[in-house]
Image (spheres, grey):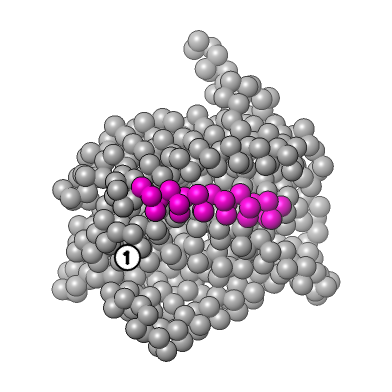
Amino acid sequence: MIATIRRRVFDLWRDTGLRSALVGIVVRIAAACVGLCLQIVLARVMALPEYGVYVILWTWVSVVGQVGVLGFYDSAARFIPRYGRRDKQAHLAGFLATGFWAVLLGSGLLAVAAMVFLLALPTLVSPDFLLPLAVLALGFPVLSLETYLTGIARGFGWYALSTVPGFILRPVLVMLGVGLAVSMGFTLDAVTVLCLVVLASTAILVLQAGLLRARLPKTNLRSSAAGRRRFWLVVSVLMMPAMAAEELFVWIDVLLLGFLLPPDQASLYFAAQRSLSLAAFVQYGFMLVAARGFSLSLAAADRAGLQASITRSTNATFWLTIPSVALTIVAGYPLLHLFGPAFVSAYPCIILLGLAHVIRAATGQAAELLVVQGRYRLSLVIVSLSVVICLLLMLVLVPVFGITGAAAAMVLVQTIRLVLVTWLVRQHTGYWVLVRPFTRIPAMG
């Protein structure tokens, strides 16, 4: 038994892709701890309704951010590894420049449109959300550019650079800002906290841009790739609906609760969801590596290698998600109590959401496979069906069972999604994405 476990661990470590994923997971574990600390601090210093407003709006930013980045976050994972493998430096430089200006222009126009809407039709927005929305609108270009730079770092395989600035340094800066604001006597409402987040994101953007500029290949061949700019823009924009819908599905439960329940109830649910950050970051760690690995296999036209990579990635995601969920369930009561006594009532949500994470892990990085293959229509069909099913289930369960009903809806919808993803991806691509937990795949050096 010990020899078998040792051999499996050794095989995993020999695999460069999984080794990179494990490094990414370690970074994300640190990020989970820092992010959880930030949420605990905010829950403690803000009134519960104000914290609920912050939670709902910041969640919407995560979804709308996919629109602001115009699909270039995901298309970077498709094109950067391919151009690097084939040594097409002119194409690489052209893609990076095209993405930067497209994201800057697109997010800027969205910010202007949001401000015009808030100024022209303020009565359509709840007074509690009006000023916080204005702050986010002004900071939207910064947040979108930061997302794009994160996608570039992921495309090159610079996983620490794609995670540390946004997921560790930003929460630390926000916590420092919160401490300073409290010491100066400011009221910590949603507007103040979102201002701190935008300021911290601006600092992160400058830092990340400087680090990326220092590491990017030096080339002056941009003009030779000018004819492909329209192609990159079209492909990225066509990816955007599927990727925005995928991000919407990640946060659909919190977003719908913002409409179905008061903000204080949504904040209780959000605390339970954030307590499961470790499980979510295990899946994110493998997602960071998987897209690049899949793209390299496609560039080499290696179907067998790609299937082996899919199975290895899914198996590792599944087996690592289970202990992370179990650990969170055991520590659930103390974690929720750190947010405040009122949050302990959300413990049943931790159990149900933990089960949903395990079910989600059983199909690994199927979404990333569809991204690098350019099958954005299939991806959009899958996630759209998932969102509609989730909406219907929550409309039925939340009015009866409250936040526990929302968590139960996520278990059911993840189960349905598992069936849809396994069947549709197999039918349209020929690849098997469902976990094969006891299949041993030889490691790749």
Number of callouts: 1
The magenta segment: 375-397
- x, y percentage for residue 94? 74, 69
Pinpoint residue 281: horizontal percent, then vertical percent: 46, 44
The residue depicted at 83 percent of the width and 73 percent of the height is: 227
Residue at x 51%, y 82% (from the top left corner): 113
The residue located at (31%, 76%) in the rendering is: 126
- Residue highlighted by disc 1: 54
In the image, 75: left or right of 258?
right
Give, as a three-letter code, the residue at label 1.
Answer: Tyr
In the image, 223 versus 393, the foreground residue is: 393
Q: Nearer the viewer, residue 128 or 403?
A: 403
Q: Could you tell me if residue 271 is visible in this image?
A: no
Q: Residue 417 is drawn in which quadrant?
A: top right
Name above or below for residue 134 compared with residue 381.
below
Say what secondary structure mark 1 lies in. Answer: helix
Vertical relation: 32 (above or below) 221: above
